[in-house]
Structure formats: C-alpha cells, structure tokens
Amino acid sequence: MLASTSGVIVSLMSGIDVSILEYLSRCDQCRDYIARISRGVDEPYMTVTRSLNKLIELRVVRVDDESSNEYKYHYLTPFGLELATMITRSRICDE
C-alpha cells in the first residue's frame, strides 16, 4: 500500500513508475486522495495500481518506443492537471 508522510510518498508497489508518484505528490488534491486510499478511507479494497488509474482517469495516448520496449503515456487527472508525458512500463495500465 501507499503510505504518506509529510505529503511525501514513501513506499511503492513494484511496477508503478516512481516519477509519476513523485509528480502526484506535488499536487495537494492528488496527495490527499492518495493518503485517503492508503488509510482505507476511500475504496480500501482497490489495488494501488487501480487506485492510481482511478485517480489519473487514464486517458492514454500510447506511443510505442520499439528501441526500449517502453511506452510514453500522457496522463490527465480529473482535477484538470496535465501530468508531463512520461516514460513508464505498460504494466501500470494492465489492471
């Protein structure tokens, strides 16, 4: 599960790109939502990946990068905050 200390994400589930969590932790609304999930206040039975997918509301444009076997995703949060286009493994969207 995700844990939040002083607004900083301190534990990760493997397969979730660290840069995404770092970016989300800078957004007060995102940070509060993640903290609520980690405390079991909202949707306690969702996995971390599903919780992040719900948070981000994956509206995904995938660009295959054949040389590295990675994909570029563009994320748009429900708060209208555009996350920078990031490189992440496809498994974040597997669930």
Image (cartoon, helix red, strand yellow):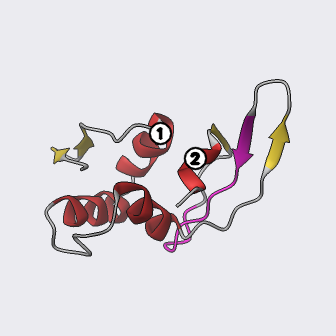
Q: Amino acid at mark 2?
A: Arg
Question: Magenta stretch: dominant SS?
Answer: loop
Q: Check residue 91 in the rendering and tell me which mark sits there, or answer none.
A: 2
Q: Nearer the viewer, residue 8 or 56?
A: 56
Mark 2 surroundings: few (<14), some (14-19) or many (≥20) residues within 10 A: few
Q: Position of residue 15 (x, y in %)?
A: 47, 39
Q: Quadrant location of residue 69?
A: top right
Q: Is residue 86 left or right of residue 81?
A: right
Q: Check residue 2 in the rendering and tell me which mark sits there, or answer none.
A: none
Q: Nearer the viewer, residue 45 or 9?
A: 45
Mark 1 surroundings: few (<14), some (14-19) or many (≥20) residues within 10 A: few
Q: Which residue does the numbered mark 1 point to in the structure image?
A: 15
Q: Quadrant location of residue 27?
A: bottom left
- Determine the residue positioned at 32% across, 59% down: 28
**Which structural element holds mark 1?**
loop
Above or below, 22 against 28 in this view is above
Q: Position of residue 21 (x, y in %)?
A: 41, 44
Q: Position of residue 12 (x, y in %)?
A: 32, 39
User: Is residue 35 inside the magenta stretch?
Assistant: no
Above or below, 60 against 26 in this view is below
Q: CA distance from mark 1 to mark 2?
A: 6 Å
**Which structural element holds mark 2?**
helix
Question: Where does the magenta region start and end?
Answer: 70-81
Do callouts 1 and 2 mark residues in contact (Cβ within 8 Å)? yes
Q: Is residue 28 left or right of residue 4?
A: right
Q: Amino acid at mark 1?
A: Gly
- Determine the residue positioned at 25% across, 38% down: 11
Q: Is residue 47 left or right of residue 75?
A: left
Above or below, 58 against 83 in this view is below
- Determine the residue positioned at 46% across, 42% down: 16
